[in-house]
Image: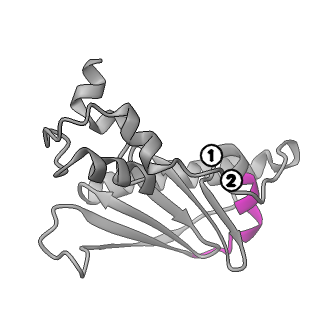
């Protein structure tokens, strides 16, 4: 097992203390730097940096950044959701490391979606059903990884 243990830290945003969501850091007891390029390949990282090394990807509207000794997850409902994501990610990290001889490491980032391309796919009604004030703000949040297309109820009906 590559990643055995970590310490979880749950906190609210300092710049938005009234926000409903929480954020999470997992402070890793092992340095997992070697697995990052393989994780980038397997989980389709959106952003990969080599110095300092990290990989960032989106899963279910959550932005997750994995560093050699820390994992950051944003916009969580609660600590239970944080536990589920961290458990899943620990399993993924260990599985990828077990198979790393079969995986071609990737040191590249994927191209980011352009906000206007995302906006073209939206209904542009500014209905606020996604809890954002406008479709443009929603498109920006999708491009950032904080939301995904499934967060637009109108798109889900289409």
- For label 1, the crowd category at 10 Å Cα-Cα, with few meaning under 14, some 14 to 19 and many 20 or more, is some
Element assignment for label 1: helix
Question: Which of the two residues, 53 or 109, is positioned nearer the viewer here?
Answer: 109
Do callouts 1 and 2 mark residues in contact (Cβ within 8 Å)? Answer: yes
**Does 30 lie within the magenta span?**
yes
88 left or right of 154 in image: right
* Residue 55 at x, y percent in the picture: 62, 62
Q: How is the image coloured?
A: one colour
Residue at 23% over, 80% down: 15
* Residue 92 at x, y percent in the picture: 60, 48
Element assignment for label 2: helix
Question: Which of the two residues, 136 or 147, is positioned nearer the viewer here?
Answer: 136
Question: Which of the two residues, 45 or 118, is positioned nearer the viewer here?
Answer: 118
Residue 75 disc label? none
* Residue 125 at x, y percent in the picture: 18, 35
Q: Does residue 14 lie above or below 153 as drawn? A: below
* Magenta segment: 29-39
Residue at 28% over, 53% down: 137
Q: Does residue 14 lie above or below 56 as drawn? A: below
Residue 43 disc label? 1
98 left or right of 16 in image: right
Q: Residue furthest right?
A: 101
Residue at 39% over, 35% down: 120
Q: Does residue 33 lie above or below 155 as drawn? A: below
Q: Main secondary structure of the magenta part?
A: helix
Locate the N terminus by quadrant: bottom right
Q: Tell me the distance, in whole angstroms, between the alpha carbons under discs 1 and 2.
A: 6 Å
Q: Residue beneath label 2, please?
A: 40
- For label 2, the crowd category at 10 Å Cα-Cα, with few meaning under 14, some 14 to 19 and many 20 or more, is many
Residue at 65% over, 73% down: 68
């Amino acid at each position: 097992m590559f990643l055995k243990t970590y310490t979880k830290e749950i906190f609210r945003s300092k710049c938005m203390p009234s926000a409903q969501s929480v954020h999470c850091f997992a402070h890793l007891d092992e340095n997992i730097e070697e697995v990052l390029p393989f994780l980038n390949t397997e989980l389709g990282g959106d952003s990969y940096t080599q110095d300092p090394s990290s990989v960032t990807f989106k899963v279910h509207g959550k932005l997750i950044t994995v560093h050699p000794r820390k994992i950051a997850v944003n916009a969580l409902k609660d600590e239970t959701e944080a536990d589920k994501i961290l458990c899943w990610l620990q399993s993924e990290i260990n599985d990828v490391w077990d198979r790393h001889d079969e995986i071609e490491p990737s040191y590249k980032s994927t191209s980011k979606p352009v906000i206007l391309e995302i906006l073209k796919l939206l209904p542009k009604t500014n209905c606020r059903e996604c809890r954002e004030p406008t479709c443009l703000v929603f498109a920006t949040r999708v491009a950032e990884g904080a939301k995904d297309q499934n967060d637009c109820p109108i798109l889900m009906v289409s």
